[in-house]
Image: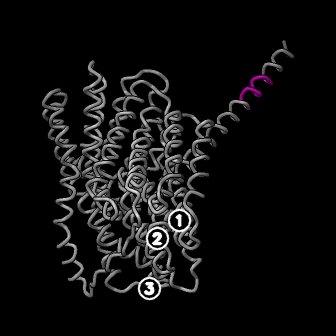
Amino acid sequence: MHLKRQLKEKTQESLASVLPITAIVLILSITVTPLDPGTLILFLFGAVLLVFGMSLFTLGTDMSMIPMGEGMGISLSQSKRIWIPIIVFFLLGAMATIAEPDLQVLAEQIPSIENMVLILTVAIGVGIMLVIAALRVKFGIPLRRLLLIFYLIVFTCAFFTPNQFIPVSFDSGGVTTGPVTVPFIMALGIGIASLRQDENSSSDSFGLIALCSVGPILATMLLGIFYQPDEAVYNLGTMPEVLTTMQAAQYFFTELPHYFREVAIALLPIALLFFLFQVFTRRFHPHQLIRMSSGLIYTYLGLVLFLCGVNVGFLPAGQYLGATLAASPQKWLLIPIGMLIGYFIVRAEPAVAILTKQVEEISNGSISHQAMGYALSIGVCISVGLAMVRVLTGLNIMWVLIPGYVIALGLSFFVPPLFTGIAFDSGGVASGPMTATFLLPFAMGACSSVGGNIMTDAFGIVAFVAMTPLVTIQCMGLYSTLKHTATRRRMRIHLEQVDDVMVYFN
């Protein structure tokens, strides 16, 4: 009964997340950007799969991925042999990255570099960064210090990287922190930090996703520098021809086996490492293992439905909308419509719900999931607007990324460490499969219509989505800090006035 109530709550939350973006696309399809019936049918079918997929996924992660991550984080941090957690964290980061579905897609976009070379290099980068991130939490090294160092290295490398690889390099940072690894890695950080009893342990539990996102950026840049490729091109895929609802259903059914296999490969490394962990530690009791196994099945089925819905249903709609808007006389509509879509689409990211819930729990309710939702929506809204400006003008991506990261890193000196960790984690979480399969095709379709270079003008939207929450969430933290400071000042003045009155009457 308890499980049914949880599933009902998750379904209601998913429905509330998916309905706004569905309504926006429907309104656009009957006004400024009419969709052909086949694309609209696929989109609506995809929206239904998104609702059920998100419900099962979020329920499953609560039951399996989060307790698995916390348990492994605690046990590995208690190990007296430092090399054991280092090896496990490296393997976990590398194996999970190799299996991440979105990385396979990214590898196809860079024809000048062999797929496996790119995948293995990026996986090694993530594995190394996960080790550094975990050791940072264990020993209490300030996150801000590492972020300053690594982003300085990133922007230094950017000056030597071929222009067409800079947007793809920054996009890779968001692509590799996908829905499979994000909940587990976040829980891992909470488990590691739980053994510390100092005042910064809660804030230090965040930041693993932030540092893991830097590894792919550096890895892709170094590959671009090392290979010195002559050119990299991207060709838009063909739109599926669907005329009836039966054809749409058949199209989804033919694609489902691919996602069953893809998600199984993605979850297998984590499940295997957890199995070995349980064999050696015996940390979890049989009834806990049964619950976690059930949760893993829910996670698997939910992610299959979600990825099938978003790839088969949302991707063609995003590409078609972008191309139609850009081909119209009112090209400027790309900016406000893109911003509106960005505001609502981030709420449909499966890992966002996991992040906002964990933030609310860790902060003891001082940072509500509603406030986090608004900050993320505003950030993604701004990022899509900037991306559409790039599509229309061909603006160099570095003119946006450098000021954005300078502001984000500068704010880290004025806000509590908790907000910095949450903000930089949010960037990787917000740039998930909804961004890769709706916003990116939206930008590609628009770029193709205006005759731009897809590699330099459309790629980079994932990087923007990963960057702007760093600013908006830390601005929320700055506002909270200033508000608390003002409240304390008023209380101090009030107490001084009371003291003056008491002295007068005495």
Neighbor class of circle 1 (other Cα within 10 Å; few <14, some 14-19, many 20+) is: many
Q: Mark 1: which secondary structure?
A: helix
Query: Are the residues flagged by discs 2 and 1 in contact, CB closer than 8 Å?
Result: yes
How far apart in space, not on screen, are marks 1 and 3 (Cα)?
23 Å
x, y percentage for residue 410? Answer: 62, 41
- Disc 2 to disc 3, C-alpha distance: 18 Å
- SS of the residue at dot 2? helix
Q: Nearer the viewer, residue 456 or 310?
A: 456
Which residue lies most toward the right here? 504
**Amino acid type for the residue under numbered disc 3:** Pro
Q: Is residue 415 left or right of residue 486?
A: left
Determine the residue positioned at 50% across, 30% down. 142
Question: Of marks 1 and 3, which one's residue comes earlier in the chain?
Answer: 3
- The image quadrant that residue 81 belongs to is top left
Compared with 431, 313 (above or below) is below
Dot label at residue 51 = none
How far apart are the alpha carbons under marks 2 and 1?
8 Å
| Horizontal and vertical percent position of residue 343 | 51, 62
Please rate how many residues cluster around mark 3, counting C-alpha atoms within 10 Å: few if below 14, some from 14 to 19, many from 20.
Answer: some
Tell me the quarter of the picture where residue 64 sits.
Answer: top left
Quarter where residue 493 is shown? top right
Classify residue 488 as left or right of residue 94. right
Q: Residues within 10 Å of mark 2 (few under 14, many from 20)?
A: many
Callout 2, which amino acid? Ala
Image coordinates of residue 9 in percent, x first then y, are 33, 54
Q: Which residue is mark 3?
A: 34
Magenta region, main secondary structure? helix
> Are the residues at dot 2 and dot 3 in contact (C-beta closer than 8 Å)?
no
- The span shown in magenta is 491-497
The tag on residue 387 is 1
Which residue: 52% across, 70% down? Answer: 338
